Amino acid sequence: GESVGLHLPTLSVQEGDNSIINCAYSNSASDYFIWYKQESGKGPQFIIDIRSNMDKRQGQRVTVLLNKTVKHLSLQIAATQPGDSAVYFCAENRKGGGNKLTFGTGTQLKVEL
Amino acid sequence: DSGVTQTPKHLITATGQRVTLRCSPRSGDLSVYWYQQSLDQGLQFLIQYYNGEERAKGNILERFSAQQFPDLHSELNLSSLELGDSALYFCASSRTVNTEAFFGQGTRLTVV
């Protein structure tokens, strides 16, 4: 069945360190993936996306890696800041499925000073 | 600010009632999506519209319905409300399909 799962429900990092948030997906037909950040009381905020014809994409302080062989997605945040504290969701979109983004359960990132 | 506007921000209503949630997409976006977020279910896809037509459907209850109007705003109608319908309801929009979706701030529905 369709499922997107996260390996760690909570991740604590020191300010300034790099963070890596992982996500496993099970649908091999998924061809588009997005990472969202959700702060308390707010809607999910788009961070970065990647299509299945790529294995790496970089943004400002963030990098997404896609390993289609093992159906694994990761979000790397460089020099993590207190403002990065939030819940991070990966979402997958299956080819031909409109934009029925299927979300994972989320990882809580806590940045310690 | 994502550019997606949802109203109202908060809604408290009684069981059995009907409510309408409204969403205005970002300027130029043709597609609108509705999601439900509850503590025990995470973000659940409800339904998607593209340029006025239903495009994809998730686990949306029969008591729920939605539509997208010619001006591209969308409404989600929830009827015969139950306590378990209490949740955050998010609207998102995207330029076309299979592109990044931007979320509104949500409507917090409390059914008492």
Image (cartoon, coloured by chain):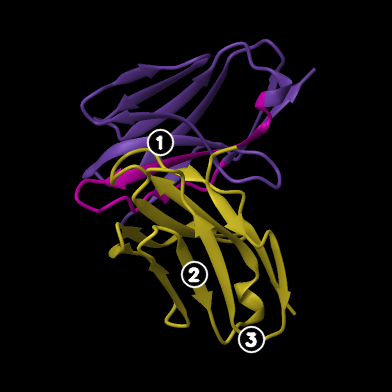
Chain colours: A purple, B yellow
Q: What residue type is labelled 1?
A: Ile
Co-location on one chain, circles 1 and 2 = no
Residue A100: x and y, percent? 34, 53
* Label 2 to label 3: alpha-carbon separation: 14 Å
Mark 1 chain: A
Circles 1, 2 touching at the beta carbon (< 8 Å): no
Task: Specify the quadrant of the image occupied by residue B48.
Answer: bottom left
Dot 3 lies on which element? loop
Q: From which residue to which does the magenta span run?
A: A84-106
Examine the rendered structure and indicate whether residue B92 appears above or below residue A39. below
Q: Which residue is drawn at 45% across and 45% down?
A: A5
Q: What residue type is labelled 3?
A: Gln
* Label 1 to label 2: alpha-carbon separation: 24 Å
The residue that disc 2 covers is B76
Apparent side of residue A27 relative to residue B23 in the rendered image (left or right)? left
Q: Nearer the viewer, mark 1 or mark 2?
A: 2
Question: Where's the C terminus of chain A, which quadrant?
Answer: top right
Label 2 neighbour load within 10 Å: few <14, some 14-19, many 20+: many
Q: Which residue is drawn at 33% across and 18% down?
A: A56
Apparent side of residue B53 relative to residue A34 in the rendered image (left or right)? left
Q: Which of marks 3 and 1 is in front?
A: 3
Question: Where's the N terminus of chain A, which quadrant?
Answer: bottom left
Is residue A102 shown in magenta? yes
The residue that disc 1 covers is A34
The residue that disc 3 covers is B17
